[in-house]
Amino acid sequence: MVEVLMVGVRSPELSPEEERQMMRDIAMAGEAQTKEGDTFCLITQRWWRLWSAFVNQSPTITTNEGSSMEYQGSGRRPPSIDNSDLICKSFSEDSTPEIYDTLVEGTDYILVPEEIWNQFYAWYGGGPALARKVITRGSSQTELTVEVYPLRLQLHFLPSVDHHALKMSRKETIGALHKKACEFFHLIPYQVHIWDFYGRCKHALLNDLDATLDDANIQMDQDILVEVIGHNGSCKSVVQKNGCAYIDNGVSKSKSCNSNMSQFPNLCLTNKAATIKTGSCVGLIGLLNLGNTCFMNTAIQCLVHTPQFARYFLGDFHQEINRDNPLGMQGELALAFGELVRKLWAAGRAAFAPRAFKAKLSRFAPQFWGRNQHDSQELLAFLLDGLHEDLNRVKQKPSNKSKDTDGLPDEQVADEYWANHISHNDSIIVDVCQGQYKSTLICPACDKTSVTFDPFMYLSLPIDSESAVSIYSCIEGFLREEPLVPEDMWFCPRCKERRQATKKLDLWRLPEVLVIHLKRFSYSTTIRSKLETFVDFPLHDLDLSTYVANNKNSHGSPQVYQLYALANHYGNMGAGHYTAHVKLINQNRWYRFDDSHVSGIIEDDVKSNAAYVLFYRRMKTDTNGIGTHSFEFCLA
């Protein structure tokens, strides 16, 4: 941890304009000069707003994220700085304050350079100072970030069933961790090994003493095993008194008994779903809840476990970032999501808090700011669209002229619509998730017919208000011919009047990954309600061949899909909770992702009336047209 800064003495009071100008000068002098090792300090957002209102300026000059917020001046000088609302417990002058785990930059606090903190302290006093260092992150170690939360580690010394919590910077070395472990447990260094004890299973020996904790993929709240080595190089036998678990020559074992195993949670988990050795496979990492962020965690897990996206973001996707797309986010959303994918598919990692991604998301989509519950499907739609724009391969969009398609066969018209769409939109998101449907409008007065072919990212299916329905009936309801609502009348080019035309949708081109949104929520000016209807959907062999109007497709390979992920919503709209069910394809096993908690489930427990968003992948077919599994994916 960085030492608490309390420097300077009270300076004479200045006018608001003088304070604003001095802060601007300090900020401009330090702009673009931030380097590894520099110090930033947290200031509570509450006080920062008071000062911003006092000087009547935008606070963008010192925020770490660069967000823009305006506050009208009140003319009232703020009191002393009070960061107490950021601190989770009392502390003495000899200890370092500990901040809450769920703080969000831009919502709860801002980060200011050390020079600005010192000037604020000289003017206003108060505190406590919460100093943090700038470190380098990322695969190239060139991305600068302020380490607001150092690593929290749990040291386990099994011979005495003792454990100890400590905090270390990600840039400290394995050697420093080894030294601290020996000092705390009073051990002789050359007799001690330390292990990555992810999931309470020995995962990797940490013997590269010069490597940083970041290099070794050590994550927040990770377990570290401290092991004493005997003269012959083997670890000393460790047997628990209750006989439930022991370590012998470095191998974890378990025995059946009825004794309490709370000292060894997750050492060996057995239930009706499966015997799980946590840490033996990648892809089983949870996300900490930052305060009603289960909607975000659920959407992330479903996308991250989409095989095509995992492969793409674990590879060199940077060359496809479109930083000049005015509809995108200069590649920042794609980079933040790529970092999440790498963390969630890394070996030996524990659950972590996606704070950086949440801050980036809130910056570009303010509707997801703060700690309110949101719709996971709305977030999913934003992420898919935002990632597409950030990764759009089309740098200069052509100006396509509309063509007269009257009399042309549907196949030709659809292909022209799709070619026009791809000429403007070409990304991994389009490759994987986008399909095409046919929309037919018929005028009730003159029978004028209008046919268009539009892209879709997901299907939003209505649910009949019955106790149980089939997903096929939901699809048929979506495709059913219906008159337009009066507020959405169609202007008939032949009648030259607005008409309540009939509309018919048909599936035309299906994507590799089909996302299905079950419309459980309904909104009106006075009522918000949720349908608890059980929708029966197949885990295997969702056959959509009969719903595809494209004759070329329907007469070709079958349109058969297999479920690999789904988002669940439990409870009502105001106090609900989201979880994800995900199938690790290489294991052929289902898991429940409930924020930071990940557990195995049997296939029979995958379906429930909480199913909200379904993720299907298309199955390949052999030469005989028989479906086979596709996209087999293993990152182990």
Image (spheres, rainbow, N blue to C red):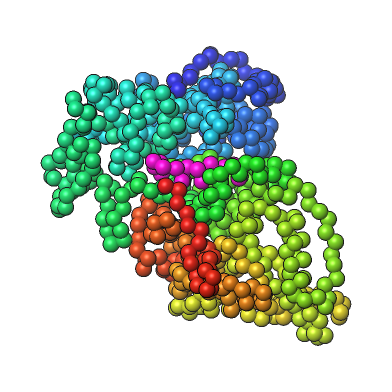
Q: Is residue 576 visible?
A: no
The verdict on residue 364 being magenta is: no
Magenta span: chief secondary structure = helix
Residue 236: quarter of image: top left
**Which residue occupies 71% across, 67% down?**
454
In the displayed structure, 130 sits above or below 109; it is above
Residue 94 at x, y = what percent?
36, 20
Q: Is residue 162 left or right of residue 300?
A: left
In the displayed structure, 313 sits above or below 494; it is above
The verdict on residue 349 being magenta is: yes
Residue 6 at x, y = what percent?
48, 18
Q: Which residues are magenta?
A: 334-351
Q: Is residue 303 left or right of residue 240?
A: right
Residue 323 at x, y = what percent?
70, 41
Looking at the picture, tell me which residue is in the foreground, 128 or 553. Answer: 553
Residue 408: quarter of image: bottom right
Q: Is residue 62 visible?
A: yes
**Which residue occupies 75% across, 65% down?**
417
In the displayed structure, 60 sits above or below 440; it is above
**Which residue occupies 61% across, 47% down?**
366
Looking at the picture, tell me which residue is in the foreground, 120 or 96. Answer: 96
Q: Quadrant of the N terminus?
A: top left
In the displayed structure, 106 sits above or below 116; it is below
Q: Is residue 511 left or right of residue 326?
A: left
Looking at the picture, tell me which residue is in the foreground, 59 or 132. Answer: 132
Residue 573 at x, y = what percent?
49, 62
**Which residue occupies 31% across, 49% down?**
277
